[in-house]
Image (cartoon, rainbow, N blue to C red):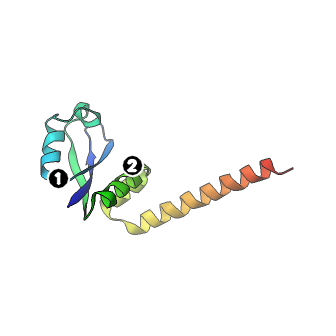
Amino acid sequence: MYYVYMLKCADDSFYIGMTSNLERRIFEHQNGLIEGYTSSRRPVELVWSCTFATHDEAFTRERQIKGWTRAKKESLIKEDWDQIHKIVKQERKTRNERNSKKQQKSAP
C-alpha cells in the first residue's frame, strides 16, 4: 500500500509527498530526518492523506496534486468537492480564453 500525503508547514506552505509507510515518514519530516523542503519549515502537520494500491497510482496522484493551486489543495483538505469542481471549471475557462487569444494573435 502507498500513501500520498499533504503536510502543512510552519510557514503555512504545503508539502505533498508519497510513501509506503506514512507513520514513519511523518516522524522523519517532523524530526528533520529528511533533508529538503520540510526540514527548515518545522513543525509540520499532516492535513490530508489517501491510500493507493500501487506505486504508479500514488506517484501519478502526487504529481497531479503538486501542480494544483493552493485553493484547490485547501478544498481537497476540506473534502469540498463542489469547490474543487468550481475551481476546475474556472481553470478551464481561463485556459480556453488564453488559447483563444493566442489563436487570434497568430491568425493572419
Q: Contact (CB < 8 A) between labels 2 and 1?
A: no
Q: In which quarter of the image is the N terminus?
A: bottom left
Give the distance between the C-alpha atoms of the residues marked 2 and 1, in whole angstroms: 18 Å
- Depth check: 97 or 67 in front? 67
Inspect the image, locate mark 1, and give the three-letter code of the amino acid beneath it. Leu
Q: Is mark 2 on a helix, strand or loop?
A: helix
In the picture as drawn, the residue positioned furthest to the right comes out as 108
Taking the image as shown, residue 1 lies to the left or right of residue 81, namely left
- Depth check: 95 or 80 in front? 95
Identified at 54% across, 64% down, the residue is 89
Identified at 34% across, 53% down, the residue is 62
Q: How crowded is mark 1: few (under 14 residues within 10 Å), some or many (20 or more)?
A: some
- Figure quadrant of residue 13: top left
- Depth check: 2 or 27 in front? 2
Q: In this view, does 36 lie above or below 70?
A: above
* Of pointers 2 and 1, the one earlier in the residue sequence: 1
Inspect the image, locate mark 2, and give the three-letter code of the amino acid beneath it. Lys
Q: Which mark is residue 66?
A: 2
Residue 69: give x, y in percent of width and height: 44, 50
Q: How crowded is mark 2: few (under 14 residues within 10 Å), some or many (20 or more)?
A: some
Q: Is residue 34 above or below residue 23?
A: above
Residue 65: give x, y in percent of width and height: 38, 53
Residue that badge 1 annotates: 22
Residue 91: give x, y in percent of width and height: 54, 57
